[in-house]
Image: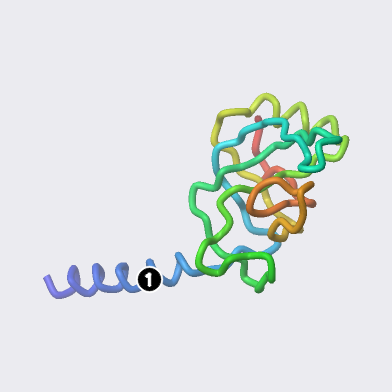
Amino acid sequence: MRKLILALLTCLLAVPVLAQDGLKPGDMISGRLRFFHQQHPNGTTWISVYQIVADHPRNFAEADEFCDPDNPPKTFHLVVMGDRAKKRRLDRMLGKTVSVVADAFHCSENAWQVGDAVVFNWHFPEGSKR
């Protein structure tokens, strides 16, 4: 009985530590993938956006002046920039839960970056087949 209580206590103490780990380059972002067009606020251009709505939002490991430390980024704009292979693959996964490895990201700073954060460099995890 003592071992069981000790094991439960250890698990309860470890969970908050895991939840506080900040998002850093090379970490995975998972969530529902969506696509939409949004007009730039100046009215001249439409922006095509692939966006992940994160299952488990968390703050960045390094401070970002454009992030609100009390509200971790929940929506991540995936920049595709003419990569047809990524675009085709994302199109097949719309509406589904997906995971990507974020290599370079920051909180949105301007109207071209749609969502809480933008991920410029990213790739699909090794072994993902979709």
Q: Position of residue 122 (x, y in %)?
A: 75, 49
What is the quadrant of the C terminus in the image?
top right
Is the residue 4 above or below the residue 46 in the image?
below
Give the left or right position of residue 9, taking residue 29 as reference: left
- Mark 1, residues whose alpha carbon is within 10 Å: few (<14), some, or many (≥20)? few
Q: Position of residue 77 (x, y in %)?
A: 69, 45
On the image, numbered disc 1 is attached to which residue? 14
What is the quadrant of the N terminus in the image?
bottom left
Q: Quadrant of residue 94?
A: top right
Residue, far front: 42
State how the image is colored: rainbow
Q: Residue at x 38, y 66 (%)?
A: 15
Is the residue 38 above or below the residue 88 in the image?
below
Give the left or right position of residue 81, taking residue 56 as reference: right
Residue, far left: 1
Q: Residue at x 61, y 63 (%)?
A: 23
Q: Amino acid at mark 1?
A: Ala
Q: Residue at x 57, y 29 (%)?
A: 95
Nearer to me, 62 or 125? 62
Is the residue 31 above or below the residue 119 in the image?
above
